[in-house]
Every structure is written in structure tokens, then in C-alpha cells.
Image (cartoon, grey):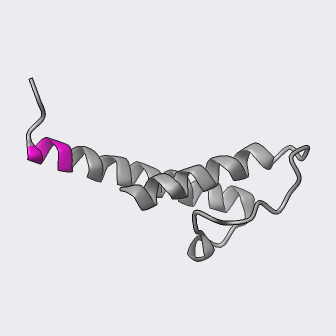
Amino acid sequence: MSLTIEQIEKSREEARRYLEYSTYTLCMILGVDVDSLSSDMNIPVGAEHQQYGSYVCLRNQVVALENL
């Protein structure tokens, strides 16, 4: 059974809404300006910093949003 076009579009919209909310929340936690986000953003902390994983996650979410 394959998905209909409507189901695919609905799934994309739900994923987009979730990613937008999640990205916004992570930006608020990290103190990042939402309007400055891009998939090639620089991570402002080193790999040993405790927030490094959060910045990587944020960048991955931006990439996913751009791909939707």
C-alpha cells in the first residue's frame, strides 16, 4: 500500500511544523537568533564544549528544514 499525494504532503507539513518548533526552542536555549540560521552556520564552540552536540543538532535540523 503506497501513500497518496495528500498523505505525503500532510506528513511533510507535520514534519516541517515539528522541526520549526524544535529549531525555535533550541535557538532560545542556545541564545541563537532564529533569523540568522543557515545550513552552513559556524558552530561557535569547540568540540569539547558541553553545548557542541546541541549546535550540531541545530545545524542538522536547519538542513532538514531546508530539504523539506
Specify the segment rendered in magenta.
Answer: 5-9
Q: Give me the residue at 89% from left, 53% from top.
A: 46
Work out whether 10 lies above or below 66. Answer: above
Relative placement, left or right, of 61 versus 44 is left
Q: How many marks?
A: 0
Work out whether 23 lies above or below 10. Answer: below
Q: Give me the residue at 89% from left, 47% from top.
A: 49
Could you tell me residue 20's position as x and y percent? 45, 58
Could you tell me residue 24's position as x and y percent? 55, 60
Place residue 11 in its image quadrant.
top left
Screen quadrant of the C terminus: bottom left
Screen quadrant of the N terminus: top left
- Residue most extreme to the bottom: 35
Q: Give me the residue at 53% from left, 58% from top.
A: 62
Place residue 37 in its image quadrant.
bottom right
Relative placement, left or right, of 44 versus 30 is right
Q: Give me the residue at 79% from left, 48% from top.
A: 52
Could you tell me residue 42's position as x and y percent? 74, 65
Work out whether 63 lies above or below 4. Answer: below
Q: Main secondary structure of the magenta part?
A: helix
- Residue most extreme to the top: 1
Based on the picture, tell me whether residue 68 belongs to the magenta stretch: no
Q: Which is more toward the observer, 31 or 5?
A: 5
Q: Which is more toward the observer, 58 or 67?
A: 67
